[in-house]
Amino acid sequence: MKILMLTNTYLPHVGGVARSVEAFSDEYRRRGHQVLVVAPDFANTSADEHDVVRVPAIQRFNGSDFAVRLPVPGFLMSTLNEFQPELVHAHHPFLLGDTALRIAAARDLPLVFTHHTMYERYTHYVPVESKLLQRYVIDLATGYANLCDRVFAPSESVAEVLRARGVQSPIDVVPTGVDVARFAAGDGRRIRRELGIPENAFVVGHLGRLAPEKNLEFLANAVAAFLKKSPGAHFLVAGAGPSETMIRETFRKPGLDDRLHMAGTRQGRELVDTYHAMDLFAFASHTETQGMVLTEGMAAGLPAVALDAPGAREVVRDFENGRLLHDERVEAFVGALDWIARQTPTAREALRRAARQTAENYAMPRCAEHALRIYQSLVERNGRRRWVPRNRQELGPWESTLRLIDAQWQLWTARAHAAGVAMQREMPNHPPTPPPGSLVRVWNRLRRLISG
């Protein structure tokens, strides 16, 4: 198959979506499929990357480490004409997600959307953050999902949320797979020597983007409290982001900064070795849809301590491969860290074995095979029932244009509906104003023409 991926974040950006797109694309190519990735341009992008089309973008939007794409250049269309995709996969419901919908409509291709993120948890990056904006973002993503042929949810928890929010498109649970063999072996001792961590220290670890929505203030406070009562313990943090200063300050105040080790962003072999320098993985985020770092850590044999939330509850099994906490208190988290630290070597090895077995359930070949079966069914179904106008000879070159206009109308309608619902919940005495009736009548005529 020829698969077109569109994503607002991609390498060298370090984050779950970028790594998911990379991982699936690599596995699809390994199986003989062609994948073209369309992504924003980022600083330090590799000059020799293949099968990737970069579009202009505003870097570090509003202080975040995300890029916001600018209008798509014309050369993308010529690239698509050459590539001739059979299926379009959007990884966001806006920005390049809009582009994905237009491409799928204009070329009469099936559209898949992965709901990677609980987007309402990221509105603090927008100056006008409010409950109204959060409601708008939820309804916007829901509306987009209902314009797609298939929706991928990274976990069953997310699938349940999407159904409750009104997503009516078919939903499949397709987690991002982990390369189990890659993470199984690493040189953790080398990383400990590099960072000055004693070889016999008990190391609590965390890896990921360091941002407020990851609940890192809670995590830092909990680990700092654990270190206070555990003189031989250290905290290893790998990643970068706006919360780095907060983490450092949390450990500096009680005089624990000599046992905090900020390793920065790690990729490739360095990433694997960093996992192996840890004894357990600590995770407190509520915003994940899967928590890829949990499955990567478990592939490296790390038990986890995590708060009960979507993404974590599917992976962490309490007292089996770690601790899953329903009690979000620092004291409870400290107790869970302490429970693992006090296990005998035999009991810890049992936790590590269970973690590795959990990772096997998320092996990339298994996840990719599931996704490809869905892709193939959509492509075959699309081939059997191509859009055919009532009078093809009369429409001729207008066919693609009308489908494109139809997609744009649906996008506009979804956004208007999301805005209207948000405003109505904020100000129930002021219902949203519907679009002008004459415009609706004109458009309905066009849609009847398109549908034949």
Image (cartoon, rainbow, N blue to C red):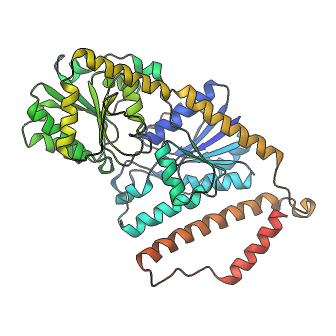
**What residue do we see at 47% from left, 40% from top?**
18
Q: Residue furthest front?
A: 319
Q: Is residue 146 visible?
A: yes
Residue 216 relative to residue 291: left or right: left
Residue 13 relative to residue 390: left or right: left
Residue 36 % position (x, y): 62, 38
**What residue do we see at 38% from left, 26% from top?**
298
Q: Is residue 86 visible?
A: no
Q: Nearer the viewer, residue 152 or 77?
A: 152
Q: Nearer the viewer, residue 297 or 160?
A: 160
Residue 290 % position (x, y): 44, 40
**What residue do we see at 38% from left, 33% from top?**
294
Residue 194 relative to residue 451: left or right: left
In the displayed structure, 225 sits above or below 440; it is above
Residue 23 relative to residue 248: left or right: right
Residue 149 % position (x, y): 67, 51
**What residue do we see at 38% from left, 55% from top?**
121
Residue 226 % position (x, y): 15, 35
In the displayed structure, 237 sits above or below 426; it is above
Q: Nearer the viewer, residue 410 or 158?
A: 158
- Quadrant assignment for the N terminus: top right
